[in-house]
Image (cartoon, rainbow, N blue to C red):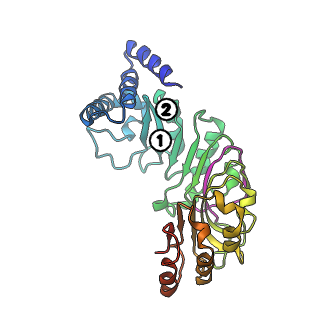
Amino acid sequence: MSTEERAVLGDELQQRGDPQGELIALQLALEALPADAPPARRNAIARRIAAHLDEHHDALYGSLAPHVTRLSLPDLRDPALEVRTWRGGFAETVWLQTTAAGPTLVDVLGALRELPIARDVRRLEVGQGDHPGFVAQLLRQPIPALRELVLGDRSRWMHDLQHTDLGHTRALEPLVEGLEIVRILQPIVYTPLASSTVRVLAVSHRGHDLFGPPTSAFEGRLPALEELVANGFLADNNLFDRHPRLRHLSLYGAYEDGWLEHLIRSRHLERMQVLQLGYQLTDADLDTLITLAQRLAHLELLDLRANAFTVDAIAAAQARLPPCVRLR
């Protein structure tokens, strides 16, 4: 929905006495302020928005209102939902979870879908709860504007795992087409995903031997992939050929012999912006970087801090590598 369409809708809703109408008008006014607008003016509109959200909390959140923190009653200990970003009177980023004494994750999703403020949700961040049930319901009733999905809570992933764990990426396969960002923050058994739209993917592979190095290379039919965060995979020499638009790579796992030198010498390095490589690089890899240091200068970041280099090797490398390299 365009800004103009939102403004028209806001006028219509205000005429009907719907509190979302004024919320649309206020948030559009805040978004329209120029970057150099006086802070006092910006703060005045922000305060009006906060007061409006508090005054009309029950009407805006419907059946979920008792499970959403209210500004004037901020002591809710176990909220089920939080709107983390708004845009033009509509929730854009929403976090939701199962609560101890309230609705389940699936119930929260169902109630969210009924809220007028949630018609343009673009990003869902999903905490604890029945992830398989959540994904199944999302497949039955898609959210048309949804482009980003974050599954899991790093701080609580071991809690009640048998009821929260998605288990396998096969469950996501029918969902990822149309999404642009997918982040799975709990370890999962990975089989290659396919999507023509996913630009950012974060995944930790639970399928390899926990007591040995990873042996499975990251694969997938992801032609639009630009950023990959992969934990528990083997870095193989064909990774960049399979993903020709990849610009940002965070890879924590094992590496084929000579993988780093192959990358630094290859044409693929020219398109890379950020590399974060961890766990199993050695002092010999630092020697390779020193030898080929002139090829690294265009990088925004080469983060190697998640490796057990010796102190002497780090000291020798820091003086001979460009500023983009982080060693400790």
Mark 2 burial class by Cα count in 10 Å: few <14, some 14-19, many 20+: many
Please tell me which residue is depicted at 71% across the width and 76% down the height of the picture: 258
Q: How many marks?
A: 2
**Callout 2, which amino acid?**
Ala
Secondary structure of the residue carrying numbered label 1: strand
Residue that badge 2 annotates: 118
Q: Is residue 197 magenta?
A: yes
Rendered view: 57 above or below 84: above
**Which labelled disc corresponds to residue 94?**
1
Residue 121: x and y in percent read 52, 35
Rendered view: 20 above or below 78: above
Q: Which residues are magenta?
A: 187-205
Cα–Cα gap, marks 2 and 1: 9 Å
Answer yes or no: is residue 234 visible: no
Marks 2 & 1, CB-CB < 8 Å contact: yes
**Callout 1, which amino acid?**
Val
Q: Depth check: give the residue in front, 178 or 312.
A: 312
Q: Depth check: give the residue in front, 328 or 261.
A: 261
Residue 229: x and y in percent read 59, 60
Secondary structure of the residue carrying numbered label 2: helix
Residue at the front extreme, as displayed? 294
Please tell me which residue is depicted at 48% across the width and 77% down the height of the picture: 318
**Which labelled disc corresponds to residue 260?**
none
Residue 75: x and y in percent read 28, 46
